[in-house]
Every structure is written in structure tokens, then in C-alpha cells.
Amino acid sequence: MQITVSVRRYNPQDKETPSYWQEYSLEVEETSSVLDSLIKIREEEDGSLALRCSCRSAICGSCAMRINGHAKLACNTKVSDVAEDGGTIKVEPAGVMPVIKDLVVDQTLFWDKVKQVSPWLQPEGEEPEAEYLAPNSDMTHLAGVMACIMCGACVSDCTVLEMDPNFIGPAALAKAYRFAADPRDDQDASRLAALSEYGGVWDCTRCYECVEVCPKGVAPMDRIMALRDRAMEAGYTNNNGARHTDAFEASVSHSGRLNELTLPIKSFGVLNLPAQMSMAPVAIRALMRRKIPPIIHKSVPGVKNVRRLVESVKEEQQDEQAAG
Amino acid sequence: MLEHDVLVVGAGLAGMRAALAAHQSGANVAIISKVHPVRSHSNAAQGGINAALTDRGDNWEDHAFDTIKGSDYLGDQDAIEYMCTEAGPELIDLEHMGVIFNRDDEGRLGTRAFGGQQRARTFFVADFTGQAILHVLYEQLMKADVRVYEEWFVLELIVEEGECCGVIAMEIATGSVFVIRAKSVILCTGGLGRLFEPSTNALIVTGDGIALAYQVGAPVMDMEMVQYHPTTLKGSGVLITEGARGEGAHLLNKDGERFMQRYAPNMMELASRDVVSRSEQTEIDEGRGIDGCVLLDCRHLGEDLIAERLSQILEIGMDFAGVDIRKEPIPIQPGMHYIMGGIKTDMDGRTIVPGLYAAGECANVSVHGGNRLGANSLLDTVVFGHRSGRHAADWANGKAYRDLNVDDYVDGKEKEFSDLFSRQTDERWSQIRLDLGKAMDRYMGVYRDEEGMQSLLAMLPGFRERFAQASLQDKGRVFNTDLIFTLELGFMLDCAESIVLGGIERKESRGAHSRTDYPNRDDENWLKHVLVTRTDDGPEVSQLPVTITKWQPEERKY
Ligand SMILES: Cc1cc2nc3c(=O)[nH]c(=O)nc-3n(C[C@H](O)[C@H](O)[C@H](O)COP(=O)(O)OP(=O)(O)OC[C@H]3O[C@@H](n4cnc5c(N)ncnc54)[C@H](O)[C@@H]3O)c2cc1C
Ligand code: SF4
Ligand code: SF4
Ligand code: FES
């Protein structure tokens, strides 16, 4: 089939030119992946196109990028699933992380967050001579989380992270869950305490984005919710807690954190769509995920907008309260 | 000045295990890798890792025997004994570090069956064992706070007065060239799969370390032993794990016949890889294939088992072949998968260059001989990674850093680069690499003969000439993948030379080396390793006897 691949290019060595779109037209097989097309461009047409890729089979986690506005692995996205014959595929670097060149982003932020959750097994007491005994069901359950290939697709599209760099984020929290739920690990209490702090499990807006984009079925949001349950059970009751409220009140004015955006949903009620429409596109996006075409899905308001939004939410809340 | 007691090149299983061992020995250790550690090719290992656990009623001698028989008696038996006795402790170590192995009903580590072995001794994590171990080793590296030069590309080894004392490397994000000084260097750069087209290997697997060692005069050994895996997808070369056959999948020809009953009546689909690949190739060559393939049938395994244990294969089938393995058989063919040969080392990982060590797929301590058993490679990487890390740390201990003229090394590289950047031709790495890969697949594939190998040898100078002409389209230094691929092609050409020379030298059929002009194994003359060493007068081929402890060569039947 004939396709056009429109690639968001950026070369830091060319100070004059900011990022721009470049179009490549090419003929590919029906079964080709987007990665196959990019490799074809690189090998046959334009060797200056930079991207990371290695395994071609969704296991090394190198090739996460935005395809038609959503983070995906280029290697397991079929061309025919994202474009018609003669159609155009838009390819951009992953979000949230700074671009090094073309489709290559700097993943330092991603790994810093992973390191933040002390991602290694911490058993206590004497090591057994043989293996630790553990139920197979626990292990297969954890394998579902361990299947994470650290591609960063979830981080790229996390609606909170794009506003608030303090949020630990979906991949790292899923990793944290992997230890908290490991019967061999004995640091549950300290892990859960740390994860209940600002930037931790309570900052997720449950927008579902990470679950949607994860190519390995890790479902980070579900893991975050499971961590919340565990944290509550362990006595870290943060919901509606004064500390929490204070923390997000204080932080929102500088970083525009998204937790506030759940407020209109709560105050208007889930079914009152028109009222919510008047709120930020982000909130709508969180709520109506599947109903909105990708084109709207992409637009992202800046922190300023969030700040303004927060103000308006507060006003409306006050009005609401005043109204009784 | 960047400097470390021990510098590990490569962050796959072998590299990370080596770094942890050197760290535990008290050395100042760093890892340098051209990709982030978790992107290393070890993550592709789906099936599992072998170990004979005594408390399961298994024993290391049976494992050793299966390995030796699998190697077609070309493996060195002292090294195999060591690997098989260390397998248990090494596996338990991995479990203690946090690897989530599948369990049996009592909560102990569970096993699955793999090819070429008398009993099920393959431990696994669903069907992403390599990834699961790789990520846990990286966790340990983060815990130990080992320095990682992430996305740095090693260009050359520095050898002065016969001793290896560092590397010249390029930071990919900036394109800057650096010298990293070290008292010992461990090469853990993995295999060379992309030298063949197609291959199951990831795009980064280009034989860099094997060539780096070869270039400084370290001999490579048994390079003709190239494993073709029996179940790969046509075209892309993507692998379907042996785990599928381990769980009971069948191989069928176009008539629906389970043809393995004619080649290996006892072990059937689970015979050694070389045996199964040859059987498939024969079926295909004799017209009983379909479109260059035979069929792998998983349907009778049931949806539950497929979902729990072969989920990745289910995904791969859908994504790459458009086949739902629960509903229809999937077409597969033999495809290049693994290099048994590599840099010759002793059991401590030492090469003949003092200070230079090697472990993992790039090395050849000779535990795989003529044919590697499935799930023995991961074992090889951790066992010998561990041991070489310890020994490289010992070597570095108490040694002083050598005074290096850093500027000379950097300037020399910059000069080479500016020549390369200024070339203006239509020749590019991509076309040369494709042509080379196809030639390797054609002449060094499942079946070989003198004529084919000689014609390949005669083609190599032509490839080198084209390579010398190759020019870049990306003229910048920041994340220049055009440059990296070109440099890798240079490494591949060196590897190709040693493979062809080894193949021509070995005038018999053993393991993966099946010659139609010498169809039989010849223990009288060829119970020997073939070494290729680069000298000032060109490559030199020599031989070394195989080490035999207590298992005398027997006929190999499955
Ligand atoms: C699809 C597939 C499935 C497999 N399944 C199994 C299995 O089930 N069981 C089993 O035992 N084995 C299996 N194998 C084989 C096994 O995975 C490999 O042999 C093994 O993982 C190799 O590990 P390694 O540490 O030696 O190298 P790798 O994991 O390949 O790591 C090489 C490292 O070297 C670095 N490097 C290379 N060149 C340079 C350079 N120039 N500069 C800097 N760094 C460099 C890379 O960045 C990388 O970090 C499989 C192989 C494949 C291809
Ligand atoms: S569900 Fe939570 S973690 Fe996932 S993308 Fe949304 S805000 Fe981020
Ligand atoms: S959770 Fe999924 S999307 Fe996020 S890094 Fe892991 S594999 Fe990628
Ligand atoms: S290339 Fe490895 S995940 Fe896509």
C-alpha cells in the first residue's frame, strides 16, 4: 500500500530551524509496522532520521513514540491499523521527555522516577538456602507487571505528568506495586508510606490513558489503585485528608497539578456532561476518553490555563456552596 | 580522566552479572553500553534458563551429558562441568535477587521441557525469561549504584605493551569521543546475528565485541558454528520460542505429517536444534514444505495454557504473521539465531591479551561446542559473567593505571571520522549490510559446501571495498545512527571473515556445521577447535584439541 509518513523532525545542531514536519511517501506491505516504514525511510531515503529501535518485536522498549497523537510502539503498530491506502501517518517523539533529536527523547526523567521507588527486592531476615517459597498465582500475577518493558509510552501520555513533573508516574508506580505485592519483599510499610506522599499514588487522576497506551497490558492505573487500597489498609488514609488538601492547594498554583481537575467532575456529577464541557479540555479528555476523536485528544493546555481553570473551579465551587 | 578498575563493555545478562561480581569484589566498576541496559538483546530470550537442581532429583552430570551430546562433542568438558555445577547456585541467586520465576504447586521453582534434554530442567518466567532476569539485574545495578555509560559506543580497545588498558568510545547523544582508562576490560557484547539476513536477533546485535577482540589479535574460535533456530517467521526472522515445542506443539509438513518421527523418533520435536532445523530444511528442499516453510501447530495445547505460558507467542503470531495460534498452525522456517563461536577464553574469562576478558555470547569458553541447547545460553551468561567479573577484579586489584596519551587516541579517531564524514558517494551501509547478510545466509546457512564457502570468501574483499567507500547522509554528530550503523558494518565484516575461514577449515559435519561435501562427523581428525587469529600477515587459522574429561564421543541419536 501507498502511505505518507509525516515525521516531526528536530535537529539541535541546526539552531536556525525549530522542529518541523517532514513528509515521506513510500510503498509498504499491508503487514508492515510503522517501524518497518521508518526503517525503510532511514535505509533507503534519509539516513539522517534518528530513532531508537532494536528488537522489532515489542520487547526491548526502544521505539515508543506518538503515532497519530497517541504513544505507541512503532514496531507493534501496523501501518494498516493507523492509515488507509494513500493515507498519512503522523509520527512524533514521545511526550513529557525532552527531545534529543527527531524521534529520540531523553529518558533521564523516566529512569529517575523509577529509581525513586527503590526498585529492588528488599527481603528481611535470613536468606533461605534454596528459593523463597511463593504461590504460583502470586508470581503469575506479578509477571503481568514485570512484563513492563520500560518503554515510557504511559509516561509520554500521562495527563498528570505533562503538568506536574513531581508525579512519580505510571511506569514507576507500577514498578513499585511489583515490590509491594511481592510476597518476598518486607518493606511494604515504608514503600507505602513513601508512595502516599505528594507526587505518589494519590496524584493520579484515573484518566485511564496509561492503561490505553501500554503495549504490554501492564495497566499501570490499576496497579496504582491497588497501591491505594494497600496504603489505606496499612493506615495511610490520605483521601480527603487535610494534609493532602493542603499539599495540592499549595502546589497547584505553581505547577498546575491535575488533581484539581477531578473536582469539577465531583461537583457537577459524572453525568452532567454539558457542565463539564465548559471545563478544561483535559478534564473532558479524562472523562470521555473513548468518545473524542484523536485530534482533540492531542491538544494540551499550558500550566497557565490550568491555573485559570483552578480559579474558575474554586469560584464555581463557592457559588455552588453558596447556592446550597 | 574517565577511569575504572574494571570496565564492562555490554549490559546484557553477561555484562550486568560481571559488573555485579566485580562490584562485590570491591572493584570500582563501570558498564558501558550502546543501548540502555534493559534494551539489551538478552531481553529477547523467551524460553528459560537451565539448571539441574539436586533437590528436584536432577543432577548436574545429566545436564552436562545433555550439553556435551548437544554440542556434538565439541564443547570443552571441564567448562561444561563448571557451568552445570554452578547452575543451581546461580539460579537461586537470581531468585533471591528478585526474579519472578513461575512456581510449581508447592511454591517452588517450576520447570518446563526444552529441546535436547532428558528431563525438564528449564526454569522460566512466562515467556519472557530473559527480560525478567535482565530487569532484575538492572535493579541490582541501581541498588549498587554502579556507573553506567548509557548509550556510549565502544569504537576500539586500547592495548599498550600487550596489555588491554581501556577503550575509545563515543557518547552517542553528543557524538563526542572519549578515552576510558581501565585496568581490565570485560567484553560482554553479545552475538552477531544481524550479519545474517534474516535473523532472529535484534538490530543492535552486530558482533562488535568479537571484532574488537579480533582486531587486537585475540583469537576467535569455532566461528563456523552458527545456530539456525527451527522456528522463525519467514521474512522478519522473528522467533517462536522452543518453549512452544516444550509445551507440546507439533511440527507438520504440507501433508499434515509430524515429520520429526522420521528423523528423531524418540525426542521428536524436542531433538537438538541443529537436528530439527536440518530436518525442516530437508522437508522444504524435498518439496514437502509450504512456501519455504513448515507448520508449527499449537492448537491442541488449549487456550488456557497458551494464555498463561505462551502469551508472547500468541501476540507475536498475531502481530507479525497475522495468525491466531489458538486457531491455526503458524508457518515457520529455520533462521539464524545464535553464534556458538566467539572470542576464545579460559574458564576465568581471560583472553590471550592480558587485562582483556570476555563472557556471554561474544565469548567462547566452549560450553556450546557445535550446537547450543536451548536455555543454556542464559546460563552461560550468568555463570561465566559472574566468574569473569570476579577474575577481572582480581587482576585489577593492586594494579596501577597506565599512563595513556589520551589526546592521541581521541585525535586519531576524530581524523578517521572526518574522513568518513567527508566522503561523497552513493554507497551506504544499508545496501552493503543487506547484500552481505543475504550472502552469509546463502553460503553459511543450514547446509554448506566448499564451493559455496569459497565463493563467499572471494566476495569479502569486494564488500570491504564498498565499505571503504560508504558515505553518510547524516553529517551531524548528535545521535547519528547513520554513523553507528556504518561502524557496526565494519565489525560485521571482520566477523564474516572468521566465520568463512572457520567453515572452510573444518572438513566434516558436526553440530551446526553441516557440509554436504563432508556429511559425516570425523572424530579422528576433527575433535578439534578451529581458531582464527588476525596477524600482520592477515588471518591465520589453527587448531586446538577439545578437552574431554569423562564423556567419550558417541553417536548422536535423538
Ligand atoms: C529471540 C531469541 C530468543 C532467545 N531465547 C533464549 C532462551 O530462551 N534461553 C537462552 O538461554 N538463550 C536464549 N537466547 C540467547 C540469549 O538470549 C543470548 O545468547 C544472550 O542473552 C546473550 O547475552 P549477552 O549478555 O552475551 O549479550 P546481550 O544481551 O546481547 O548484550 C550485549 C550488550 O553489549 C552492548 N554492546 C554491543 N556492542 C557494543 C559496543 N560497540 N559498544 C558498547 N556496547 C556494546 C549492547 O548494548 C548490550 O548491552 C535467545 C536469543 C534470541 C535472539
Ligand atoms: S491513570 Fe493516572 S497514571 Fe495513568 S495516565 Fe492517567 S493520571 Fe497518569
Ligand atoms: S507500563 Fe506499559 S507503557 Fe508504561 S513503560 Fe511499562 S510497558 Fe511501557
Ligand atoms: S523495537 Fe523493541 S520495542 Fe519496538
Image (tube, coloured by chain):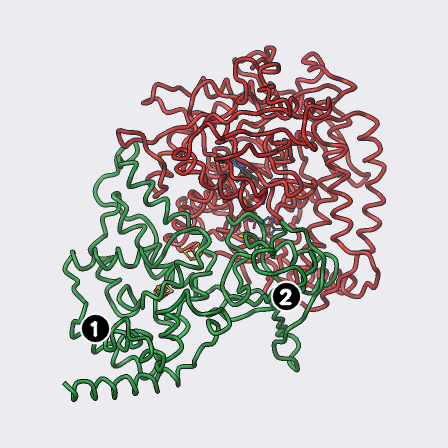
Residue at image location 17% in from the left, 59% down from the top? A232
- The quadrant where residue A169 appears: bottom left
Q: Nearer the viewer, mark 1 or mark 2?
A: 2
Mark 2 residue type? Thr
Left or right placement of residue B327 versus residue A265 in this view = right
Quarter of the figure that contains the C terminus of chain A: bottom left
- The quadrant where residue B257 appears: top right
Residue at image location 41% in from the left, 47% down from the top? A147
Determine crowd level at label 2: few under 14, some 14-19, many 20+ residues with C-alpha closer than 10 A: some
Residue at image location 65% in from the left, 57% down from the top? A37
Chain ID at mark 1:
A
Percent across and percent down for residue B134 are 45, 45
- Of residue B299 and residue A160, the one placed in the foreground of this image is B299
Q: Is residue B23 above or below residue A115?
A: above
Determine crowd level at label 1: few under 14, some 14-19, many 20+ residues with C-alpha closer than 10 A: some
Q: Is mark 1 within 8 Å of ligand 2?
A: no
Percent across and percent down for residue B176 are 63, 65
Q: Which residue is mark 2?
A: A88
Tell me how far mark 1 sits from mark 2, CA to CA. 45 Å
Chain B colour is red
Mark 1 residue type? His
Q: Secondary structure at mark 2?
A: strand
In primary-sequence order, the first of circles 1 and 2 is 2
Left or right placement of residue B422 versus residue B166 in this view = right
Quarter of the figure that contains the N terminus of chain A: bottom right
- Of residue B317 and residue B239, the one placed in the foreground of this image is B317
Q: Is residue B229 above or below residue A243?
A: above
Chain ID at mark 2:
A
Percent across and percent down for residue A228 are 23, 60
The chain painted green is A
Give the number of the disc on residue B474: none
Q: Which residue is mark 1?
A: A244
